[in-house]
Every structure is written in C-alpha cells, then in structure tokens.
Amino acid sequence: MLTFVSFKWRDPESKTQYTAEAANTLARMVGRHYHKPHRFVLITDDPAGATCETYPLWADLRGMRHPLGGGRPACYTRMKLFSREMRDVLGPRVVQMDLDVVITGDITELFERDEPFIGWRVTNGRKPRVYNGSLWMVTPGALDYVWSDFDPDVTPRRANAAGYVGSDQACMAYMLGEDRPYWTARDGVLSYRLDKLDRRALPAHARIVCFHGPKKPWHVTENWVREHYR
C-alpha cells in the first residue's frame, strides 16, 4: 500500500508558515484523486488541528540551515525517508508531497512505478539538474546510503560545489546521481510559476501543480485553483 507523506514544522526563519488545514486539504485532494488503498501521514512537530494521520517529527537534521541563508527553507530532515527505519514506520513505498501542491487530476497511474526513487524535474527552469523537493517517491531502505552516508558538515558543501541548488533536493541529486527516473510536465506535473499558470489555462493533462515559490495556492484566485484546492 502506498503512503503519502507531507511535513509541517515550525521554522521561525522561514518566510512561509504552513497550517494544519493545508495538510487536511492535501489529504482530501489525495483521497479524491488517488484511486487505490493508501495512507496519508502528516509528519509534524504540532499535530493540533490535523484530521489526517500524524507521526511525530524526528529531531535528526532539524537544526541545519539552507546553505544560502536568507529565510530559504532547509528540509534536510526529510531525507530520513530514505532510511530502512522508515520502512517499518511508513511502509514499503512512500510519496513525499509538499503541502503547497494542488492536485487537479487522477494521480493513480503516476505512482504505478517500482523504481527505488523517482523525482520531479522542472526541465524548463534554471535548475533542471535537481530532483525538486516538492514531489518524490522512494522505497525506504532501498537507497539507505542517502541517509546513512549523509554528513551535515560535508555533503551540502560538496553538493553546492557540484552545482546543485537547494537543501535536501541538492543533496539528493548529488548522492543519487542525475540518471534516476523522474517526472516532468509531460507527465502532468507542472510548476505554477515556471509554467506560467497565472497567465494561461490549466492544461488538460495536468495532474499535480507545484507552488514552489513565494505564491501559494491560498494566495491566488484562478478558478482552477479554487475548484481543486479544497
């Protein structure tokens, strides 16, 4: 059975703070658009208000900051999903999905794959080498070294020197290599900002729209967002 996971924690340095209702909304969207048995688990340091299943957020790598600072999100703690330990907690197959995505179509087929890792790449952006942290799927334990070999003092610096951008997404690309399978806009996984969905109609093949930027689903007024983000 597939487990959908999202994270919510209080980060006083982050420009965006997420709510329990964002998690509840995402759980409802998954329930409407994934047509097989599944779990939805919010991993959080504050479960108040969440109506979905929750799991306590671990302390591992919580104190790490983004290498560029400036209030940018630092999500290294999510990399624990690669560990063998998480298989016992979350099951054999896990999808990490950010709280600021909008699901607009049937996502069942999207996750009918058995590779140990699949990421999302924004191939029309300036950073096509990274697997964007908004959406990825992993078999916990299959690539355990991504977690067990991670060195907080060394790995981010080496990832940055190799040209990878971001926090956990940069380190995943550096440690996994660039030849792992991935979704793109062709698969219906779109970027609100880079696909300019504030200026054009939602494409018919869209399944997931990621708001990886300053604008979030609750900030915009497009009809398709109001229709699906509920």
Image: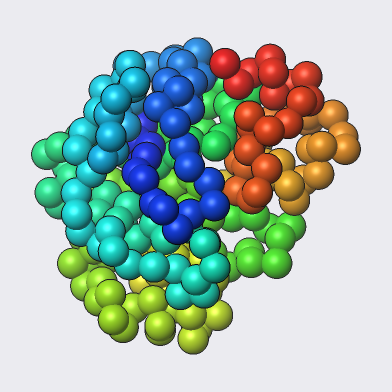
Q: Residue at x 39, y 76 (%)?
A: 156
Q: Is residue 167 above or below residue 80?
A: below
Which percent across, then down, holds residue 34? 46, 20
Residue 197 can be seen in this image: yes
Q: Classify residue 121 as left or right of residue 18.
A: right
* Residue 153: quadrant of the picture: bottom left
Q: Nearer the viewer, residue 90 or 9?
A: 9
Image quadrant in which you'd find residue 229: top right
Q: Nearer the viewer, residue 72 or 134?
A: 72
* 35 or 158, nearer to the observer: 158
- Foreground residue among 186 and 208: 208
Q: Position of residue 32 (x, y in %)?
A: 50, 13
Task: Examine the rendered structure and indicate whether residue 178 appears above or below residue 159.
Answer: above
Q: Is residue 138 left or right of residue 70?
A: left
Point 48% across, 27% down: residue: 22
Which residue lies most toward the front here? Answer: 12
The image shows a total of numbered marks equal to: 0
Residue 39 visible in the shown view:
no
Which colour scheme appears in the figure?
rainbow
Q: Quadrant of the C terminus?
A: top right
Q: Is residue 194 placed above or below 52 in the rendered structure? A: below
Query: How far across and how far down the image is residue 42, in percent?
Result: 32, 32
Residue at 12 percent across and 49 percent down: it is 85
Q: Is residue 28 left or right of residue 143?
A: right
The x and y percentages for residue 226 are: 69, 18
Would you say 40 lies left or right of 206 here?
left
Quarter of the image for the N terminus: give it. Answer: top left
Residue at horizontal 68%, vertical 33%?
219
